[in-house]
Image (spheres, rainbow, N blue to C red):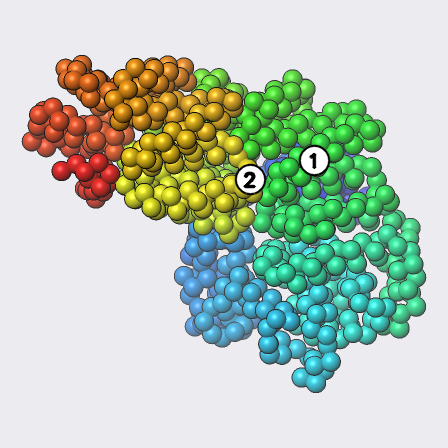
Amino acid sequence: MIDEAIKFDEVLIVVEDAARYERRRIFDVVNKFEEDDRVQFLFDSRTSEWEEFDSKISDVDRTQIKNDGFQSVTLADVEESDAEALIEKISETTNTNSLAVISPEDVMPPQNQQAVGTMLQVIYNILLSTDSKSDNTMLDADVQRKFNASDPGFSHKLPDGCRLSEEAIESIDDREFHKVAIGVNILNAIGQPIREHLLYALASTDEHESIRRVLRVLENWMLFDEPRDGIYRTFPESWSLLYLEEVLENPLSKHLFTECIKDFMSVLTNQEVRKEFRTSTVIENNGWLDEVDEKQTQLLNGFVIDLFEFNTRKPKLGTLFGTLEVSDLPISEKCSPFVEVQAQLYRGIALRHRDRDRARKSFEKARKLAGSKMNSPKRTRLFRLQCHRRLGNIAFHGGDFETAKSHYRDCLRGYDPEDPSRERALCRANLGAALHDTGQSEEALDQLRKGREACEPLPPKSFPGALVHHHLGAVHKTLGNYSESQYHLEVSQDIASRRQDWYLFAWNENRFANLHLNRGSLSRAVSHLNIARNRARKRGFTGVNTWSENDLATVELKRGEYGDALYHLETATALNETIDNSQLSAWMQYQRGIIAIEQDEIPDARGHLRKSLRSARRNKYDQIHSWSRLAFTRTFLKEGDRETAMNHLQKGLRKAYEIQDRQTIAKAIYEAGRLHQLFGEEEFAKQLFREALRRFDALGCGYETKRTIDILSKEFNLTQENPFNEYESLEGLSARERREIQKALKKRFSVS
């Protein structure tokens, strides 16, 4: 077609969703015409899909995609003026007075509540509002309304715009109606055409008339226009993703989801089912069935890849594969070996937030299959390296940093300079994070700097770049470089927001909270933690949710609200049963130990601290190790056992210096001051408190600075007229934050 067209004029080829498996052959066309200025290509794709295309080495040969030949153009953020212009254009086009019904502020989604792309949500809300001639109904509310209308558990009215009568509706089986609605949205969500043959396969028997009645009800409500070549049109893909989130909350719906998948697969794998369709009196066009007979492997490959990849896009939807037998859905032997390997990888990615053990087994199986079934040495090597990196991530999120580091280093040794920059950048970022969590902050910075270098060929708003900045923020916080930490987290959050990467967004909120917690801004810390926790709950990010509950316990502990602290720890403990993170378990044992100390329950405190210390030593959690030692110091000081207290103090201080953790060093010096004060060495104790105060102030730790000032001024008679104004870390706090710190200290330590 192109060869003929260029004889007469220039040609523009537009490809929608260009970074998908079924579009892969277009790159052969691009390469064929790369020297011909008469042919131009316009590719449409989500930013994240395009950036991750290099990593999909099983979909296309990377050498066939010359990325340097593409110019990326990204849609700008939607402003209210843009929304107003859209409303006016729709008014003009449809000859309606839309502006009289809605205004731009009615349709602009809040930044922190966006479920889908901003532009899609704005346009959808405009159309929905002008059509209803009433108050705007946001996209997610419309999804829920239509889900409830098809759910047998609800008594519902005739769907809006339905072409059938009430009597006709009554003859439709509610369960079948709901199943077809789910099936429509499965096909739409995974990017497969909504073919009538696949929908008719959802019939409980070979009687297709009942499905035809259901399809008539869905017309003008969930299906639009008559099917062209046996394919229906429906809402945007994002609408269907939200619809499937509703499926998660409903046991019957989850069961029907499984049935739909198996019924769809039967059409592509079972010739007898296709023969049955050919004898149906309802289905007229069987041309696609002939195509399946001829190209079964090709069509089956595309369906399986789309099906398994779909569950990687939203961790919450991954539970559809994690809680039902569909998670063990056999990958048909009629698929190509390549697709079998890729599907195993996608299965692991879908399960990684909910069931790390099964995710690990999927990655290991994918790695093994890659070695035995792939016939391209380069693809085999790259695929196995990707499995190594993902196995490292599984170990990392379980707190097994030594295993994670081993996987990441194996990857880095296996990469060639021409391998995808994205993979190398991600591996550097992950290795840096693992080094940081085992107390090797300088080595972590070195890896993260190399990670930034690997990001240079990538787009400026790439995910690897955002991840590198996220981990740089964490490392600089540990080193006490709070301004640097704030900068890197803000850069990461900006990229995460623009990409609508809500997983990284939630983690950044958690990091911001910990930064404010270190500074003593407890209310601001709680605000960020609530955002992180709520986002994590909504999206299924169990790890972020669990850590945020733990950190809320830390806030309440500082406030002296021990009951609330224990409540958050209990919640975090229950959540941790799902993700089984040993580092988090150690932190929670430490926190329980501190609460027990504050309540003078010394035997219980030591029991918790022993568990914390044992885990820290076994897994090289050096910061937890140091803090647990310092907490042990407090338990022995309460009993007057100076020698044992000093022993733990020295070990804790030594470990703090090893990992260059400035806050922990200051904390250890503070505890040393308390030890010498309790044993009557007032002058030396005063010097230690002053040194701790200097360090806390330099770090910007407002809570600890104020606490140390109180001790010096009240217990050593070093009164000051206005101690708040003497220290930089306190000058940076608002009057409200100062009052909050004062109240927290009074509650916890009875400071008058």
Residue sitting at x 47%, y 18%: 440
- Provide the residue designation for mark 1: 361
Few, some or many C-alpha atoms within 10 Å of disc 2 (few <14, some 14-19, many ≥20)?
A: many
> Does residue 47 appear in the picture of this structure?
no
Looking at numbered disc 1 in the image, what kind of residue is underneath it?
A: Lys
- Residue 339, by quadrant, is top right
Q: Which mark is first along the chain, 1 or 2? A: 1
| Residue 205: assigned label | none
**Image point (65%, 62%), residue name:** 253
Q: Nearer the viewer, residue 310 or 326?
A: 326
User: Where does label 2 land, which residue?
Assistant: 579
Q: How many marks?
A: 2
| Residue 138 picture location, percent across and down | 50, 63
Helix, strand or loop at label 2? It is helix
Q: Residues within 10 Å of mark 1 (few under 14, many from 20)?
A: some
Helix, strand or loop for disc 1: helix
Name the residue at 33% across, 17% down: 644
Could one spot residue 533 in this view of the protein?
A: yes
